[in-house]
Amino acid sequence: MQEPPDQPRKDATAHAEAISRIGMLMRGIGAQSAMTSAAVASRFGLNTTDLECLDLIVMRGPVTAGALAQAVGLTPGSVTVLIDRLERAGYAERIRGASDRRQVLVQARPGATAAVAAVYRGMEERLTTLWRAFSPRDLALIETFLARTLDEAAAATRQIVADGNQAPADADGRLPRQSRRRT
């Protein structure tokens, strides 16, 4: 049996629409994550960048300032200031490397993030309940999708940083309002 001549076009359209919907959902997840981070950071007197970097430190374990800078796309100097703020707030500490005493690592202070984790616990429980509804096969596919999406998003962020902080001009060659220089 032969497919109708317009079937490949319908399949391509359906595929493009699915990709568009996924893109919108990923943007929504990103926006929701930013809003959640802002709410939690505010509760603990942190800014969102500090909170997110603290989470990376917790997830990765002791990490060098350079590795943290590379992971988040900040300059080494900016990350040093960020680590100083986390230390002053009591959330992080600098330690010497076990194999190389000259190496300085940053880690979350033991027990210091328990209150932050407690705020996230309700959301974590809701999401875990949701994820349990998926089969192991579905979860494997979702995990692959998310891991590859995260890798590509991180690569895109590194490219944005490498391209500089200048906002792109619009189609008429004008910079967005907040980026225009006053003369």
Image: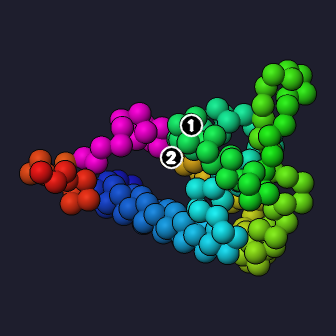
Which of disc 2 and disc 1 is earlier in sequence? 1
Q: Which residue is found at the position 75% from the left and 51% from the top? A: 87
In the image, residue 64 lies at what x, y percent? 72, 34
Residue 180 visible in this rendered orientation of the protein: yes
In the drawing, what numbered circle is on residue 77?
A: 1
Please give the range of residues in magenta.
156-168
| Mark 2 residue crowding within 10 angstroms, few (<14) / some (14–19) / many (20+) | few
Quarter holding residue 116: bottom right
16 left or right of 115? left
Above-or-below relation of 183 to 68? below
Above-or-below relation of 133 to 1? below
Say whether residue 53 is magenta: no
Which quadrant is home to the N terminus? bottom left
107 left or right of 65? right
Residue 59 visible in this rendered orientation of the protein: no
In the drawing, what numbered circle is on residue 153?
A: 2
Q: Which residue is found at the position 85% from the left and 52% from the top? A: 109
In the image, residue 2 lies at what x, y percent? 35, 53
Along the line of sight, which residue is nearer the eye, 8 or 95? 95
| Mark 1 residue crowding within 10 angstroms, few (<14) / some (14–19) / many (20+) | few
In the image, residue 43 lies at what x, y percent? 67, 75
In the drawing, what numbered circle is on residue 145?
A: none
Disc 2 residue type (three-letter):
Ala
